[in-house]
Amino acid sequence: MSIPTEKRPVLEIRNLTQNFGGLRAVSDFNIQLMPGELSGLIGPNGAGKTTVFNLVSGFYQPSEGAILIDGVPTGGLKPHKVTALGVARTFQNIRLWNEMTVLDNIRVAQHYRLGYGFFHSAVRSKRYMRREAEIAREAAELLDIFHLTQYADEFPKNLPYGTQRKLEIARALSIHPKLLLLDEPAAGLNSSDIQELIRLIRWIHEMFAVTIWMIEHQMDVIMQLCTRIKVIDFGETIAEGNPEEICNHPAVITAYLGDDTI
Amino acid sequence: MENLVQNIINALQWGSFYALIALGYTLVYGVLTLINFAHGDVFMVGAYIAFFSATFLLTTLGLPGWIALALCIPVTMILTAMVGVTLERIAYRPLRNKGAHRLYVVITALMCGLILEHANLAIFGASRKAFPQLIAEHVYTIGGVTFTNLKIAVIATAFLAFLFLHWMVTRTRVGMAMRAISYDKFAVPLLGIPLDRIIVVTFILGSGFAGLAGLLFAMSYPVLEPYMGALIGWKAFIAAVVGGIGDIRGAFLGGFLLGAVEIMVVAFFPSTFRDLIAFTVLLLILTWKPTGLFGIAKTTKI
Amino acid sequence: MLRRYSVHLSLATVGGLIVYLAHQEYISLYIMSVLMFMGVNIIMSTSLNLVNGYMGEFSCGHGGFMCVGAYVSSLLGVWLFAGDKVFGAPLLNPKYTLYAFPLLILVGGIAAALAGLLVAIPSYKTRGDYLAIITLASNYIIISVIENIGAIGGSRGFMGMKQLINAMGKSVDLPWMPIWVFLFTVFCIWLMRRYISSTFGKGVIAICQDEVAAEIMSVNTNKIKTITFMVSSGMAGIAGGLFAYILGYVNPGSFNILKSTEVLVMVYLGGMGSLSGSVLSAILFTILLELLRPLQIVKWIVIPLLLIILMQFRPEGIMGNRELGDIFPKLKKFYRFK
């Protein structure tokens, strides 16, 4: 028996716990993201949000619990294998390859489906030529969609900050992910850039039909985009629901504003 | 049993040299994250300075041995420290101020080492120098284990040097500034700590102890040649890394560990196996603990 | 059409010219040997640049891999084609030497590539200064192993390779060593360039700039590191094999830390991450070493001093991370540098 594809969650996390030494960074975390969902993960600083993302992308191995991407458990897989399963992400502090052209930034992200290795690159086989041409064409198309073509030969470090964010998202999408993790995409952007980012994420969500899970501190970004929000604090899930429910949730208010009984 | 004790004493003495040199590597690394590859040659220069000052004091001035030694120690340490500071001042600092890539500073250090070696060779020739005897060597024998007053002095000096540096780094203002720089090189000058002065102090300490090691080495193995610093220097560097570079305790322990491994290898195998086995052991330690015994794994934050 | 093949043509001309001049004995044996060492140095510096420049690691034991290549190809060659007191009579008829020679060098390269695993595997877990030590220790270990094998001469060295050169000359009367050095130098640069300009090889540069991002953006960093270390040390092995046959004699002492330092200097002199810089600096460095030879010991004061001064004024090396084509854009018409 197989579950129909549209019913199977893109991401399923079961009882995820992560300890760093004596510190419990994430504790008994559960979530199911259905295809096409746009969901948010919020919490105060140091709540363990990025740790959850690092666990999902395979950068850490969980102490306990399981992570399934489209039904496939990722336990023991290296990050590049997890990415090949269809998980792409961006980083809190932009992590582009700064001294490689914008076009090459996209090209290198195609490693998971290169289809050739050292030998082919040395002899320039037919397969190599075909794949390189395809990759270059697709990368150019992607840059075109994101209106980044004019920067194709620039180094990312010379681009404005907002453009770098956009490029990082474009690079993540070039992996054709099922699940896109955005780690504070609005960090460091000014308010007009943020409005553009909101439009961009909404557009990506429709255009690429990708499931998006995002961490964000800018509440208007989260409130405008996400249909479901999860709140964590000290690694524990303290609330879950739609934007209105979260806004009025007493535990969330306590976590963000402090306990007024003190 | 006696054999074992004898070997332990030999290992302690041999390790003392590594430890003293490794301390200099680790101090500079801790503050600047610079592998000062000229350090082994600074040690060699120290031995030569000791040779010339000892000969001068003994033969030219005709002082008795123990006074010559008492004068020789500070003279060697101060002059060697000056060599180290000069290197810092004319070779490393301009590069640092230009913000050159770290590895270019490393290459400069390598080149400085080559210059020291070959300048020595060009000036004093390839002939080996015999170090004069400063104090009479007494041999003590207790239950079949023999040791000399010199061996004991070497080991004691290494321990004292370690205790002094450990105290210096953990308890004094300069030491705290050094540790602060190793945490954050950019914030420290903003807090009013004079970066360059702290770096100079670091070089004074590191090179001074290398000079002391040079003196002791020359007294224990009284034959000097210009390349003597290169191999010992590389090995002391490896010892510092095995201990966890940047950590004083690590350098000290690493030095003795390397000394022990080498002495034990020679005790049980042909002496040509020394480097082979010693380096293989070190390779295994680093594979097991990639950042050394005391090194803290840097967590990558993403 | 002519433009497309201009590089091939000019290479063929230069190679042909050298061989012709050598064959007619217009160039002295001394100049010839300098030219051959230049080729060896070019291979050494470009291959180390792959690790130190492109991948951003700090390998300071490149001489060790050169040693592996030198010994493996020499031992194999002498065992198969030459009479020797260790191995006895040749196994094969020396007249086949000419055809087997490139294979001998390649086998040396493969052996060195396998020795490269000694460094590649620890590099999964550690990098930076700790990896530098591992490379350093590998260099010591390799040399120490060879010094301890008495059967192949130990620290006294190993010889007998001249017989193979003579056998090649008997088959076809051409100056074979310059030809092989030239061909292998071109082969190594060609291989490096193809590797590094492919999307696959760009993973190496991605590791240098941000290893975490590379791994998470689907680059199999361990695989790329393994391949890069193996290619780099394999080429050092090829250079070692050529070096051994040029001299006709090998000795573990010639591949010690000083050799590795020399190669490091060439890489940094040329500029990290610049292929043409490495080639250029290898050529300049070889010439400089020869020009200063009359100074004897003082040479080793003058050269480091020159380098220190160069570092002060041009800390990024001759080329920085640019290629010739970035400096002389007209060259791009003839050749894609990246």
Image: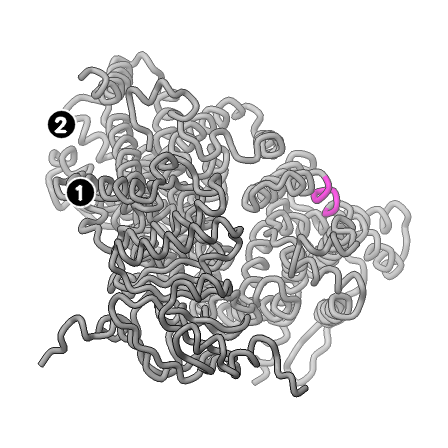
Per the image, the residue denoted by label 1 is A128
Depth check, front residue: A6 or C220: A6
Q: Is residue A8 left or right of residue C202?
A: left
Quarter containing the N terminus of chain C: top left
- Marked residue chain, label 2: C
Query: Callout 1: helix, strand or loop?
Result: helix
Q: Are marks 1 and 2 in contact (CB under 8 Å)?
A: no
Q: Give the magenta part as a residue range.
A: B84-89
Residue at 40%, 69% (x, y): give it: A40
Query: Callout 2: helix, strand or loop?
Result: helix
Three-letter amino acid code of the residue under disc 2: Ser
Residue at 30%, 40% (x, y): give it: A144
In the displayed structure, C313 sits above or below B106; it is above
Relative image position of residue B15 (x, y in whole percent): 62, 67
Residue at 75%, 64% (x, y): give it: B176
Depth check, front residue: B220 or C42: C42
In the displayed structure, C162 sits above or below B297; it is above
Relative image position of residue A133 (x, y in whole percent): 19, 39
Per the image, the residue denoted by label 2 is C171
- Marked residue chain, label 1: A
Relative image position of residue C173 (x, y in whole percent): 17, 21
In the displayed structure, B182 sits above or below A190; it is below
